[in-house]
Image (cartoon, rainbow, N blue to C red):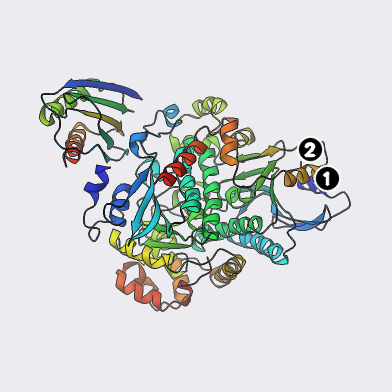
């Protein structure tokens, strides 16, 4: 689905969401109130400027204090790779955006990520992965790094990596693998109204961070949850 | 472990950069106080690296546990930058996430994260990336519970990729000159954008753009240390006592601080241009300054110290 | 990866009472060695995981030399190798044994 199709499905009665420089912002009617929409469209990389524009919108939503939901719609590139961005502290700006989303969640705003295209690396962590529930649409393509780049770094032949990718969700790019690790909670049905499906996600939100449990249940991250639990157990025993 | 005890040599002389993760932890904490969770004898090793014909480590490249610092209880995690570049794999990440979640129960004086990481371990990329997101959420919860999370950065691998984002989530950061903090590493920028955008072989450029001095001057880090374990210990103790709260006021202040930075320095090509605008008289001399001279320079830069993190 | 295990009988136990120790880091040209006092006092077992296949006889010689010199009775030794040279392996084994004697 394109962003326009998503917005049409979410808001059949209209909305004020716009896209500028690849940055998505606006609101639409939702349940008894409104939902704030922020995000990145068109495979746009996320740099210092974009991150701060998005965090500004999230902080404004928190300041209103109405506990309205926040939808983070993502079709991005990775973080913007440049000397200028790193000189200006890209790590602080991306972390700031993630913190704003995490604070929104703590302040009673349900935060829902919706990945409908690409996303990778720092841009993915600062946006979609900083929401409480991350949904995807079929055709979404989240990744940490594409396989040719993985081949370059690991010095393994590409055809061998492609073979391994079929049976090893823990490293291979793609939506199915991110679902298996628990990073993506659910894949939505584009044939049904998205508003209802997102409302159901908000209703069904669980406390705490459930991603490692999902990863264990789905087999994409077999040991992370048990390891974290064992650390907590040994820490308590003291 | 006995390896930790034997390593507890004079923290005044031990180089942070040269030390292993275990040596850093043993020398940073009060002598003999460190108690490890999931120690190497438990052999919690990566289930994934054998598929790539790669050797594993008994601790998956991260040491976690409890200790005291000046008598106060703390939790500590230390990444080993020499093993797989200190990168986040499934177990590595699970240990850090577990430690942070344990902090909510144990309510230590602080959680210390000794960063030494290139980011995500590509052989376990999806697990590493997700663990970084879980770590950031867990840090926010620990901070919101009033427990400072202090990052210490001065290792061989620096603090790159998702590690840079985690660092940006901490309450306070201490860096040494070699403590590079960045999202995209020099090689990654060069590979993707070309050497005219970033020449990764120009080491002076790397230090100026991502190194500890630049981060300290611009307020990206809160303390600057000489490259000794003792200096990091003293810095950590100082930072624990002045950690900012995690709330809307702090994030509003950070928003203003970062917007101001981009407005003032967004057109700078080089770190020396930034330093000049910050009021540093002779910015070309900064890279060669010793710790005392640099501290004196920092003291004159208003932007270096703040609670907006 | 290649797995090798060597079992030796020693004349005496390794002195000291340290239950376990670790030394070294898994990195290129380096290795980590975990020592545990868990075997009968005249037994020593050394298990090695190495990414460099085909050097079993070199490992066997290095290990035999170490056992003869250190008499590490009672100790199980586990090695994660990152491609260390034989002299590095010998050095680390002796350093590890010294930690256990403390």
Give how far across and how far down residue A55 sits, in percent.
64, 61
Residue B83, given in percent of the width and then of the height, sits at 36, 41
Residues tagged 1 and 2 counted as in contact (Cβ below 8 A): yes
Quadrant hosting residue B47: top left
Residue A173 seen in render? no
- Mark 1 falls on what kind of element? helix
> What is the secondary structure assignment of the residue under circle 2?
loop
Mark 2 burial class by Cα count in 10 Å: few <14, some 14-19, many 20+: some
Q: Position of residue B23 (x, y in %)?
A: 28, 50
Q: Chain of mark 1?
A: A
Q: Which residue is mark 2?
A: A190
Q: Residue at x 57, y 35 (%)?
A: A215
Earlier along the polypeptide chain: callout 1 or callout 2? Answer: 1
Q: Quadrant of the N terminus of chain A?
A: top right
Between B44 and A113, the one lying in front of the other is B44
- The x, y position of residue A170, in whole percent, is 53, 33
Q: How many marks?
A: 2
Image height check: is B80 above or below B196? above
Tell me the tag on residue A9.
1
| Chain containing mark 2 | A
Q: Is residue A54 visible?
A: yes
Q: Is residue A195 left or right of residue C53?
A: right
């Amino acid at each position: 689905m394109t962003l326009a199709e998503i917005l049409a499905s979410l808001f059949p009665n209209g909305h004020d969401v716009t896209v500028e420089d690849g940055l998505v912002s606006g609101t639409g009617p939702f349940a008894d109130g409104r939902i704030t929409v922020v995000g990145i469209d068109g495979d746009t990389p996320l740099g210092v400027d974009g991150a701060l524009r998005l965090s500004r919108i999230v902080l404004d939503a928190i300041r209103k204090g109405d506990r309205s939901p926040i939808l983070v719609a993502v079709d991005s590139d990775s973080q913007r790779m440049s000397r200028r961005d790193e000189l200006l502290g890209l790590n602080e700006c991306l972390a700031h955006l993630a913190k704003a989303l995490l604070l929104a969640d703590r302040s009673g705003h349900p935060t829902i990520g919706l990945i409908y295209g690409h996303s990778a690396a720092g841009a993915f962590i600062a946006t979609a992965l900083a929401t409480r529930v991350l949904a995807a649409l079929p055709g979404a393509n989240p990744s940490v790094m594409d396989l040719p780049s993985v081949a370059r770094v690991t010095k393994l032949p590409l055809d061998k990596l492609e073979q391994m990718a079929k049976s090893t969700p823990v490293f291979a790019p793609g939506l199915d693998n991110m679902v298996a690790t628990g990073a993506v909670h659910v894949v939505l049905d584009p044939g049904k109204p998205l508003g209802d499906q997102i409302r159901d996600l908000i209703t069904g939100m669980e406390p705490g961070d459930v991603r490692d449990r999902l990863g264990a249940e789905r087999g994409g991250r077999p040991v992370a949850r048990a390891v974290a639990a064992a650390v907590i157990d040994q820490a308590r025993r003291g | 472990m006995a390896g930790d005890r034997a390593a507890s040599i004079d923290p005044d002389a031990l180089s942070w950069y040269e030390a292993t993760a275990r040596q850093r932890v043993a020398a940073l904490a009060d002598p003999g106080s460190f108690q490890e969770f999931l120690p190497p004898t438990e052999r919690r090793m990566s289930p994934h690296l054998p598929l790539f014909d790669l050797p594993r480590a008994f601790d998956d490249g991260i040491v976690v546990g409890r200790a005291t610092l000046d008598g106060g209880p703390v939790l500590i995690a230390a990444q080993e930058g020499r093993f797989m570049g200190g990168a986040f794999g499934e177990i590595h990440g699970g240990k850090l996430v577990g430690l942070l979640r344990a902090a909510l129960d144990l309510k230590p004086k602080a959680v210390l994260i000794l960063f030494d990481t290139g980011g995500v371990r590509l052989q376990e990329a999806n697990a590493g990336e997700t663990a970084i997101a879980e770590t950031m959420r867990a840090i926010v919860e620990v901070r919101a519970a009033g427990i400072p999370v202090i990052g210490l950065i001065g290792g061989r691998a620096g603090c790159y990729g998702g590690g840079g984002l985690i660092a940006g989530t901490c309450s306070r950061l201490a860096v040494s000159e070699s403590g590079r903090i960045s999202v995209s590493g020099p090689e990654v920028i060069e590979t993707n954008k070309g050497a005219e955008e970033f020449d990764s072989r120009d080491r002076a450029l790397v230090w100026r753009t991502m190194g500890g001095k630049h981060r300290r001057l611009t307020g990206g880090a809160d303390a600057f240390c000489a490259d000794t374990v003792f200096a990091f210990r003293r810095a950590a103790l100082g930072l624990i006592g002045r950690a900012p709260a995690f709330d809307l006021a702090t994030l509003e202040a950070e928003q203003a601080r970062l917007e101001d930075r981009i407005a003032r320095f967004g057109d700078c090509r080089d770190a020396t241009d930034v330093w000049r605008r910050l009021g540093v008289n002779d910015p070309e001399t900064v890279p060669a300054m010793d710790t005392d001279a640099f501290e004196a320079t920092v003291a004159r830069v208003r932007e270096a110290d703040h609670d907006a993190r | 990866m290649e797995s090798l295990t060597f079992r030796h009988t020693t004349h005496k136990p390794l002195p000291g009472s340290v239950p376990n120790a670790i030394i070294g880091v898994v990195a290129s040209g380096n290795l980590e060695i975990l020592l545990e006092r868990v075997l009968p006092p005249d037994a020593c077992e050394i298990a090695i995981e190495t990414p460099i296949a085909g050097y079993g006889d070199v490992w066997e010689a290095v290990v035999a030399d170490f056992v003869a010199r250190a008499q590490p009775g009672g100790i199980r030794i586990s090695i994660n190798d990152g491609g260390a040279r034989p002299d590095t392996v010998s050095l680390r084994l002796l350093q590890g044994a010294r930690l256990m004697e403390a």
